[in-house]
Image: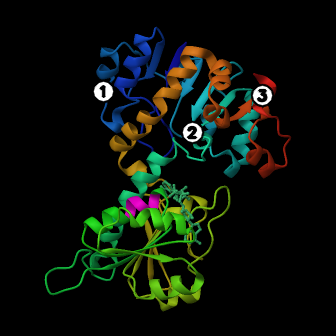
Amino acid sequence: MIVGVPKEIKTEEYRVSMTPAGVKELVKRGHRVIVQEGAGAGAGFKDEDYKGVGAEIVKTLEEVYDKAELIVKVKEPQPEEYKLLHEGHILFTYLHLAADENLTRALMERKIVGIAYETVETDDGYLPLLAPMSEIAGKMAPQEGAKYLEKPQGGLGVLLGGVPGVPPAKVVVIGAGTVGMSATMVAAGMGADVTLMDINVERLRRAEEIIPANVKTLFSTDYTIREAVKNADLVIGAVLITGAKAPKILTRDILREMKEGAVLVDVSIDQGGISEFSRPTTHKDPVFVAEGVVHYCVANMPGAVPRTSTFALTNSTLKYVIKLADMGWKDAVRSDKSLARGVNLVKGFITHKAVAEAFGLDYHPVEEFI
Ligand SMILES: NC(=O)c1ccc[n+]([C@@H]2O[C@H](COP(=O)([O-])OP(=O)(O)OC[C@H]3O[C@@H](n4cnc5c(N)ncnc54)[C@H](O)[C@@H]3O)[C@@H](O)[C@H]2O)c1
């Protein structure tokens, strides 16, 4: 198969969908890989690195879409890319269709097969292509929180780990899933006094098996949250109710009871965020203050560490890319239920229930097409 790796054109997106090591695997299996000039630059890969493992380098985005059958990307296509897609293309990338009706309708019109990383799901509900980005955002959260707790950045002026004779900062992590656990372990490693909260006792029980002594767990209710965040220096929002908007846990009155200059790193912002005031921000302008609390609400946190993110993403996507290239999409999807759950669009029809429901469109199970 001919596989295309375009340069990402979304603002501030520096990741690339395939590393030279991934390209080498495909070439070894007899596939052709077309890489756009400069596609890997943001993540630290040179065109020569790709050429060295057998990729063909082309100058323009148009050439990639023209030549390739399987387009492997990181972010959803941007409006200038819509017209380059056509029937016969298989697009494998993060799509987040339920959040964007224009994109959904544009991709339906282009009659492509669209497979979304974020809905590839194993039988036990694990999202193997979303988890690596949650791990990264989770690990970044205490790091960003520590930065914005510094006085010149608008924070309280507290050092996360404290020093002998001065207690460490109090960190409250709300949600003990992938983001929450990664954040907890980093915050604890930095020496903070961490409280990890969840509404799922089983999650807290599992956490108890691995957390160090400076972390305690607390069942999450309106009452316990209010009490915990009152004394917190840093709060990390890491909740997820699959498919739904994040609950507005930090209401105006709760924020008013928090310390002036405390920081909220609201990782859940891509689902709307946990503060009544949360709105998406960018790496260029990441924070704003509401009710005295510094809100950090960057919606694509992993974009700031494109090299790590690219490796983490491609480590997980490669086996599916190989399957799609080796078998073609129909046989690949027939043989792999997790991948089948990733198919959102086939030739103008929506094959993901939640996406169809989001826009009142007809739902067609992918089995109709394979
Ligand atoms: N901003 C970014 O760059 C970025 C990057 C990656 C992930 N995320 C987002 O971070 C969020 C968390 O992702 P995840 O992979 O950790 O999800 P996850 O499903 O692994 O964990 C979510 C946890 O939240 C808990 N929860 C739900 N409601 C709660 C409540 N009221 N109080 C306490 N806990 C509650 C759930 O029980 C679950 O344990 C998602 O919205 C995800 O999309 C954002």
Query: Disc 1, ligand 1: is the CB inside 8 Å?
Result: no
Q: Does 284 sit above or below residue 10?
A: below
The residue wearing badge 1 is 46
Q: Which mark is residue 367?
A: 3
Q: Which mark is residue 117?
A: 2
Residue at (35% x, 61% y) in the render: 210
Q: Position of residue 39 (x, y in %)?
A: 41, 30
Residue at (79% x, 34% y) in the render: 365
Residue at (44% x, 21% y) in the render: 35
Q: Does 343 sit above or below residue 268?
A: above
* Residue 284 vs residue 338, the one in the foreground: 338
Image position of 67 (left or right of 161): right
Residue interval drawn in magenta: 179-183
Q: Secondary structure at mark 2?
A: helix
Q: Secondary structure at mark 3?
A: helix
- What main secondary structure does the magenta stretch of the protein show? helix
Give me the C-alpha separation between circle 2 and circle 1. Answer: 25 Å
Q: Position of residue 234 (x, y in %)?
A: 38, 76
Mark 2: few, some, or many residues within 10 Å (few <14, many ≥20)? many
Task: Tell me the kind of residue under disc 1.
Answer: Lys
Q: Position of residue 149 (x, y in %)?
A: 32, 76
Q: Is residue 104 magenta?
A: no
Instruction: Please tell me which of labels 3 and 1 falls first in the chain.
Output: 1
* Residue 21 vs residue 62, the one in the foreground: 21
Quadrant location of the C terminus? top right
